[in-house]
Amino acid sequence: MAPKLRRALEVFTNGRLPQQNGAASFRRLLGNSFTYPALRSTLARNIQIFVYYNVAIKPLRWLGSSLEDMRAFPEDARREAGYELFQVQNGLEPSDWKPMKSVAAGVQEIRIHTGTDHRVFYITKFTEAVYVIHAFEKRTRQTPQADIDLAKKRLSDLKQVRQKRGKKK
């Protein structure tokens, strides 16, 4: 390997050059990303280049009594829900979620498993904010129809308000 390339790789990896099977261990060291095609030496063939950019944090908007409902959660469930919503605000996915097509397209459910199960419905498809539609404690295996109907009503109210303001659906 060329000395300049070796020195660049040492700087890039903080002096930890992989010792075994060059390209494979670099891939393991650097993770998954796109391959930089300009580097074509034996060891540097599969070096991964990372591109980081700041994503604007979307504000949270609480519909109906969802904020008060979430404040009624136990402390550990509240903390976990707050962390998961922060992930969503940053454009990431929560660790345990599922789409709630029974409410509407684009609505997702954060599932919080502590002593009891808690759920938070939210929607991110609007550009201005993440809307928290509903938060509740789940006591049965199936989501109660009353909670689904309440979420549907709050979402339809949100869409009506946005339409009056002249924003897209």
Image: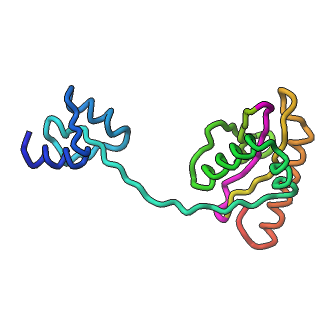
Q: Position of residue 119 (x, y in %)?
A: 78, 40
Can you give x and y, in whole percent of width and height, for residue 74 in the image? 80, 42
Q: Is residue 73 above or below residue 127?
A: above
Q: Quadrant of the C terminus?
A: bottom right
Q: Is residue 30 above or below residue 11?
A: above
Magenta residue check for 29? no
Front in this rendered view, residue 114 or 28: 114
Examine the image and state in which quarter residue 67 appears.
Answer: bottom right
Image quarter hosting the N terminus? top left
Residue shown at 87% from the left, 28% from the top: 140
7 relative position to 106: left or right? left
| Residue sitting at x 85%, y 54% | 68
Which of the two residues, 16 or 105, is positioned nearer the viewer here?
A: 16
Residue 48 is situated, as x and y percent measured from the top left of the image, at: 30, 43
Closest to the observer, 46 or 19: 19
The residue that appears at 80% across and 32% down in the rendered structure is: 116
Q: Which residues are magenta?
A: 115-128
**Which residue reaches farthest left?**
2
| Left or right: where 167 falls relative to 12 | right
Identity of the residue furthest to the right in this view: 146
Which residue appears farthest toward the front when viewing the image? 75
Judge left or right: residue 64 versus residue 123. right
Q: Quadrant of residue 163?
A: bottom right
Residue 118 part of the magenta segment: yes
Residue in the picture at 23% in, 39% down: 16
Q: Position of residue 73 (x, y in %)?
A: 81, 44
